[in-house]
Image (cartoon, rainbow, N blue to C red):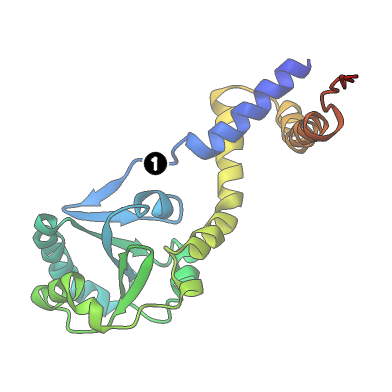
Amino acid sequence: MLSQQLLLCALLVSAACLHPAHCLVKEGDVIILSDDDFDRETASGIWMVDIYAPWCSHCQQLEPAWRAFATEMKAHNVKVAKVDGMKNRVLMKRFGVTGFPSLYLLRNGQTWQYSGMRGVADMKAFALEGYKKATPLPFHKAPNSIMGRAVGMLHSFPALTKRGYDFLKEEKGFSDMSIIAGVLLIPLTIGAVFICVLDAMYTRQPHFNHQHYE
């Protein structure tokens, strides 16, 4: 019984962490990001991100230039993405969005907001060199900083938990009671391992025989 619960515990954790919610979606060369995959996809590389609202007329006007910009930046290894702010409220909060569209450059753990002209040449110049003259967002407000990603994990925890539950329930056929037992076993297992480590480190020290020489 205990071995089955341990297996369920491992499945729950792996399902939440590794089971993808969906595959990466693209519109032409523009990558579609969401609350679920933002941190995973932007963990490396240089990104320009447009946070928009479907009803926003300015966002609709930007769309052709943004698609052309995405194609242009492929040669410079800059990924161009967009986020539907109405569907991804967590990212809106992390970026501190106050209006649409909001454009950002993500590079080396820092974030710059772009507020210049919306032509392809202007956005390209900013992404490659112009950002150096601008001030990045403070460390604690940058969504791609260590702190920002930690905040993102906290916001995403409910979704990860639901993903793990759906995986075990629908694909593995576990009952609700089994899943609850597995969840309760997680802190118990961690505590038991922690106690064993402390016991091995501090209470079971080897005893050496002292040799006396005359």
Residue at 17% across, 67% down: 66
Along the horizontal axis of the image, is 146 left or right of 23? right
Q: Is residue 75 visible?
A: yes
Crowd around label 1: few <14 · some 14–19 · many ≥20 (10 Å): few
Q: Is residue 162 above or below residue 195?
A: below
Is residue 80 shown above or below 178?
A: below
Q: Please state which of residues 13 and 180 is positioned toward the viewer in this rendering.
A: 13
**Residue at the spot x=13%, y=68% of the render?**
64
Q: Secondary structure at mark 1?
A: loop
Q: Is residue 169 visible?
A: no
Residue 151 place in picture, x, y as percent: 55, 62
Residue under the image location 61 percent in, 43 percent down = 161
Q: Position of residue 79 (x, y in %)?
A: 22, 57
- Tell me residue 8's x, y (percent): 66, 25
Q: Which residue is mark 1?
A: 22
Residue 18 picture location, percent across and down:
48, 35
On screen, residue 152 above or below 173: below
Query: Which quadrant holds residue 176?
Result: top right
Mark 1: amino acid: His
Please state, as top left, top right, bottom left or bottom right, where the N terminus lies in the image.
top right
Report the side of 180 relative to 153 (left or right): right
